[in-house]
Each structure stands twice: as structure tokens, then as C-alpha cells.
Image (cartoon, helix red, strand yellow):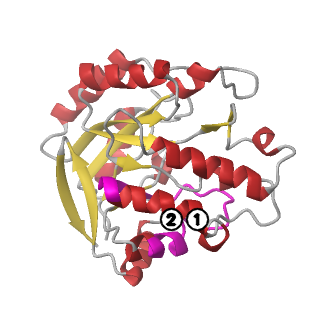
């Protein structure tokens, strides 16, 4: 049984719906060993003036987040390994990248998730990103953005939710398949292996046509390329989804050949057997 979940969000994120303490209590109730919050640091949106519904997303109050999280980390230290992390939304601008470097230098998060949410000036979750674009064009644009993000100048541990663009895509068949995008996916997976990063298996798949993203065809290709570092992630924005589908992820990973999860813990690596 998987007993870790590091990719979660609380009210400190603009789309979070739950207080941090309530999330921690649910993690304890689920008998998790390692639990992490990875609040959104959306400097990618700010750098390119990307809006959601015509409005810029609320930026995190970083001092308040780290102060509250570190206090709760100390409070729960005897009952739960609570890790205080960040999700950095990749952007190619110096403005965004410098802000991420400043966050790391000032607050020393326990782990960092590197993710792609914005592409071609829009958030590639929302349907306006897909307007006038074929699936091939839209998904390639997103995937090449992911490839670019792997060379980010700030340190990070985890590569987030490959397939994010499929979560709300309006196509009759939204699934991101390895066979349809093998060239760019191979470049992404080989770079993850080369840099020794952790590939996240994210169960917030929405309507992507898969129970988790990336799906087993991409995970199997990653394994065949020598990739062994994987991590379970619910991407929960409220306590009801913490640990969601962890049994399905564990079963799928073991069928491919994975025998453990890799957790980044303050610059060290912890293994959790599947």
C-alpha cells in the first residue's frame, strides 16, 4: 500500500479548498507516513499576464505559507512526516525564474515540483487554449514546453503531471498516447533519466481518458529507458482526494516492473516499497 502523497494543495493555493490542518488530519487518518503540501507558486502566469476567466490568479503569500507550514511540521513531527514543498509553474522568462530562485534561497523548501501549466500565452487546461488547434498541434506545443522546462535553471526534484493538457481537452479522444507523440515523449523521458529526476504519477486525471497521468504506456517506456524514479501524487485540492487511486497506481507500477517510489526529503532520497 502506498503511504505517501506529496503533491497536494491547501487554501494557500488560489484553487485550494481546505485548511492545512484539516489536510494533515486526513493524511493521519489514512495512515500516511509522508505527506506534503506543494502550494502553487504561479509566477509563470504573472510573467506572461496569463489570466483565468479574465482574471490573474491570486499569488501565494509565501511568508505566511512557510510560517504556518513549518509550525505545523514541528507540531506533527511525532505522528507524520510532513514535508513543506512548492510547485513552480515553469516559464522561460528571467522574471519568473529569478523569483523561484529567490523562494528557494529564502525558504529552503523540502522539495520542489516543476510543472507546466501555461503554453502559448494561455493555461493549457482551459478550453480557450484549444480553440482553433488540432489535438496534434496543441499537445505537441504542450509537450515541447515540458521538454523546455526540464532545463529550468532552478533546482527541482519532481516532474509533474505529464498529460496536464489532456485533463480538460475538448477532443473526442483526449488521451495522450505514447505512440502518437513518441518522438517528443522520448526526448522528455530520456532527459528525466539523464538528470535523475522523479517522474510523478498523478491521479488528478479529470477527463484525460486515463485513471492517472501519464498512463501506463508512457510509464512503461520510461522504465524501458532506465527510468526508475517515480512518485505517487493525488494533486488533491481538498482532503477528500488525498491518496486517491493509490491502489491502482501501485498495481500498475508493479506490473511494469517498478518496485519502489522515490521521495525527495530535504535534499535526501527516501524509498517506499510498493
Magenta region = 194-221
Q: Position of residue 110 (x, y in %)?
A: 24, 37
User: Disc 2 marks which residue?
Assistant: 186
Q: Is residue 195 magenta?
A: yes
Say which residue appears at 31% left-offset and 63% top-offset: 229
User: Disc 1 marks which residue?
Assistant: 183
Q: Can you say whether 141 is above or below 17 in the image?
A: below
Badge 2: residue crowd in 10 Å (few <14, some 14–19, many ≥20): some
Q: Secondary structure at mark 2?
A: helix
Front in this rendered view, residue 243 or 127: 127
Question: In the figure, is residue 53 to the left or right of 204?
Answer: right
Instruction: Say which quarter of the image contains residue 175.
Output: bottom right
Say which residue appears at 26% left-offset and 41% top-offset: 83
Q: Taking the image as drawn, is residue 165 in sight?
A: yes
Asked if marks 1 and 2 touch (Cβ < 8 Å), the reply is yes
Say which residue appears at 36% left-offset and 79% top-offset: 254
Front in this rendered view, residue 228 or 87: 228
Q: Residue furthest right?
A: 132
Spatial CA distance of label 1 from label 2 is 5 Å
Q: Residue furthest left?
A: 78
Say which residue appears at 75% left-offset and 52% top-offset: 137
Amino acid at each position: 500500500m502506498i503511504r505517501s502523497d506529496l503533491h497536494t494543495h491547501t487554501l494557500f493555493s488560489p484553487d485550494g479548498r481546505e485548511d492545512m490542518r484539516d489536510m494533515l488530519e486526513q493524511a493521519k487518518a489514512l495512515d500516511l507516513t509522508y505527506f506534503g503540501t506543494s502550494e502553487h507558486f504561479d509566477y509563470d502566469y504573472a510573467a506572461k499576464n496569463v489570466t483565468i476567466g479574465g482574471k490573474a490568479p491570486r499569488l501565494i503569500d509565501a511568508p505566511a505559507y512557510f510560517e504556518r507550514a513549518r509550525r505545523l511540521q514541528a507540531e506533527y513531527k511525532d505522528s507524520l512526516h510532513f514535508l513543506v514543498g512548492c510547485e513552480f509553474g515553469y516559464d522561460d522568462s528571467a522574471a519568473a525564474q529569478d523569483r523561484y530562485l529567490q523562494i528557494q534561497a529564502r525558504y529552503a523548501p523540502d522539495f520542489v515540483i516543476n510543472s507546466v501549466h501555461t503554453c502559448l500565452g494561455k493555461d493549457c487546461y482551459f478550453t480557450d487554449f484549444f480553440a482553433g488547434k488540432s489535438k496534434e498541434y496543441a499537445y505537441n506545443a504542450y509537450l515541447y514546453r515540458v521538454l523546455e522546462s526540464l532545463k529550468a535553471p532552478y533546482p527541482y526534484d519532481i516532474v509533474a503531471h505529464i498529460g496536464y493538457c489532456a485533463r480538460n481537452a475538448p477532443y473526442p479522444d483526449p488521451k495522450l498516447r505514447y505512440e502518437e507523440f513518441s518522438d517528443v515523449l522520448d526526448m522528455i523521458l530520456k532527459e528525466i533519466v539523464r538528470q535523475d529526476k522523479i517522474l510523478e504519477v498523478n491521479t488528478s486525471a479529470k477527463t484525460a481518458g486515463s485513471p492517472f497521468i501519464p498512463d501506463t504506456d508512457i510509464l512503461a517506456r520510461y522504465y524501458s529507458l532506465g527510468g526508475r524514479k517515480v512518485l505517487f501524487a493525488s494533486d488533491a485540492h481538498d482532503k477528500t482526494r488525498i491518496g486517491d487511486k493509490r491502489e491502482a497506481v501501485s498495481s500498475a507500477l508493479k506490473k511494469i516492473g517498478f518496485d519502489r517510489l522515490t521521495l525527495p526529503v530535504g535534499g535526501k532520497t527516501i524509498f517506499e516499497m510498493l
